[in-house]
Amino acid sequence: MKIGIPKALYYYEYPILFKSFFEALGIEVVLSDDTNKKTLEEGISKSIDEECLASKIFLGHVNNLVSRMQSESIDYIFVPRLCTFKDKKTICVKFYALYDICNNIFNANFITLNIDYEKGENELKSFMCLGKKLGKGVRETFIAYTSAKKRQKEYEIFRLTKQMKEMRTTNNMKILLVSHPYIYNDRYLGDTIKGYLKKLGIDVFFADINCSSIQRSESKKMRYKNISKSIYWKQSIHLLNGVEEYLRCVDGIIYLSVFPCGTDSLVNELAIRKVKDIPSLNIILDEEDGMAGIYTRLESFIDILESKIERSEIEYAKR
C-alpha cells in the first residue's frame, strides 16, 4: 500500500509523526514535490480568493499527488482533520476543513484522521481508528503510534537542543523568526528569506522551537501569558512562548506570515505592541513572487539593528 502526504501545512507541524506511523505499519509514504511556482499556480486555480497563501499552496501539493496517483500506484492521499486539543486549545479553521475541501475539489481517494478532543476524539483514539481503516490490528496500530510519537518527541528535543547550543555559541547577529514551520520551512516561501539573511551574516532562530512548547500542554508555566492571557490557538501559543523565551537572547524579531492569515494578523500585531524593548519587522507574504521590496526591508532592518548594537557598545565603553 502507498499513501501520499502533501508537503504543506500539517506536514511541517508534525514532520515525523504521520510518516513514521505509516511506515511502522509497512505502508510506503510518497511525498509531494517541493513547492515551486507551478505548485502555487495550481493551488490558486483550485482555491477561492479568500483562502490564505498557505492553504493555496497546500491544494497545489494535493494536486501534485493526485496527478501522480495512477502512475505511482498511490492508494490514498492523507489529509487529517485537526480541530481541538487538550486544555480547550484549538487551531486555525483551515485545518478543520482541509479533508472536506479536498474531497469536494479532487476526484481521488483520501483518508483522514480526526483529532477533536471536544467531541471525544483524542489523539490515541484517532490513530487507532486510522489503523482500523487501513486494515491493521489493534496491537500493531498501537505499537506503530507509540513508536511514531516517540520519534516525533525525540526530533523536537533534538531541534531544541541544537538551536539553544547555536544560540549560545554564535558571535553573529541573532534574529528570532516568529513564523509557522509550514511557512519558514517551505522551499518557495521561507527559504528565500532565510537564505538572504544568512547571506547578510545573520543567524536565524525559530520561535516555535522552545522549551514550553516542547512540553506541550503538560507545561505548568505558560510563558505567553505575559503577552496575552486569552489566546487559545495552539500554534500561536507556541510562537508566543518562543518570543517570551528568547526575547533577551536575540538582537531583533521578524514576524513572518502569509496573506490573509486571520490568526497571525491578530497575534503578531498583539506581540508587536506588547514587546517594545526590541526592534521588530513584520513581513506578510502574498502571491506576488517579486522579492526586491522584501530584501530592501530586510537590509534596512539589519542596518537599524547594527546601529542599535553600535550605540550600546559606545555607551558601555563610557561607563
Image (cartoon, rainbow, N blue to C red):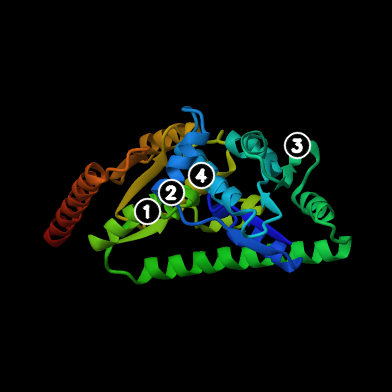
Q: Give the Cα distance between marks 2 and 4.
A: 31 Å
Can you identify the residue that label 3 sits on?
118
Q: Nearer the viewer, residue 76 or 227?
A: 76
Disc with the residue nearer the chain's start (2 vs 1): 1
Judging from the image, what secondary structure is the residue with disc 1 in? strand
Name the kind of residue labelled 4 in the image: Gly
Give the numbered dot on residue 176: 1
Name the kind of residue labelled 1 in the image: Leu
Can you identify the residue that label 4 sits on?
60
Report x, y in % for residue 55.
52, 39
Check contact, mark 2 vs mark 1: CB within 8 A: yes
For the C terminus, which image quadrant?
bottom left
Q: Quick check: 143 left or right of 171? A: right
Task: Give the quadrant of residue 197.
Answer: bottom left
Q: Nearer the viewer, residue 317 or 139?
A: 139
Q: Mark 1 packing: few (<14 Cα in 10 Å), some, or many (20+)?
A: many
Name the kind of residue labelled 2 in the image: Val
Instruction: Please determine whether, in this image, residue 265 is positioned above or below residue 199.
Output: above
Disc with the residue nearer the chain's start (2 vs 3): 3
